[in-house]
């Protein structure tokens, strides 16, 4: 596994099987596996960190989704935030995890701008 992301993912399928995925590895988003996923989680590689375990239950017809974003400013402060959720139809639902341990629900996180101003 790569060391850039602080998270790995867990996909629990409708038959109860757990699948651990390296989110930086090519091919992790297997359509067949994600199509059977009923619980989608990101788990910190180091459980002693401030990063939270985020669990999203996927409704019937929903597709698990993941993204990460790097935020920064002109003073050279940079950090990454992660989001998991699901897409159903044209609507997506996101839960964000931030490096200070905060969790936000919504299309975009609002706390990164605050964190950049405070550093």
Image (cartoon, rainbow, N blue to C red):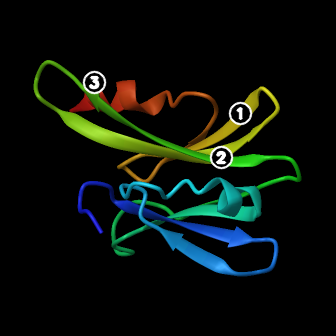
Q: Is residue 96 found left or right of 8 in the rendered image? A: right
CB under 8 Å between callouts 2 and 1?
Answer: yes
Q: Is residue 45 above or below residue 111?
A: below
Tell me if mark 3 has few (under 14), some (14-19) or many (20+) residues whose alpha carbon lies within 10 angstroms of its own.
few
Element under label 2? strand
| Quadrant in which residue 14 is drawn | bottom right
Above or below, 22 against 5 in this view is below
The quarter of the rendered structure image containing the N terminus is bottom left
Is 15 or 98 nearer to us in this picture? 15
Instruction: Report x, y in % for residue 51.
Output: 41, 60
Q: Of label 1 and label 3, which has the lower sequence position?
A: 1
Instruction: Residue at 47%, 56% (x, y): give it.
Output: 27
The residue to which callout 2 is attached is 85
Q: Earlier in the sequence, mark 2 or mark 3?
A: 2
Q: Which mark is residue 92?
A: 1
- Cα–Cα gap, marks 1 and 3: 29 Å
Percent of width and height locating residue 96? 53, 43
Q: Residue drawn 77% across and 80% down?
A: 16
CA distance for labels 2 and 1: 7 Å
The residue drawn where x is 72% and y is 64% is 39
């Amino acid at each position: 596994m790569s060391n850039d992301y602080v998270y790995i993912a867990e996909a629990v399928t409708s038959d109860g099987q757990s699948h651990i995925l390296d989110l930086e590895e090519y091919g992790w988003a297997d359509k067949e596996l994600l199509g059977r996923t009923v619980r989608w989680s990101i788990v910190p590689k180091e459980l002693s960190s401030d990063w939270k375990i985020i669990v999203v239950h996927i409704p019937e017809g929903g597709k698990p989704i993941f993204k990460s974003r790097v935020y920064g400013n002109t003073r050279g402060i940079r950090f990454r935030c992660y989001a998991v959720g699901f897409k159903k139809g044209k609507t997506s639902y996101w839960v964000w995890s931030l490096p200070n341990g905060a969790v936000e629900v919504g299309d975009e996180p609002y706390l990164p701008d605050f964190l950049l101003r405070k550093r």
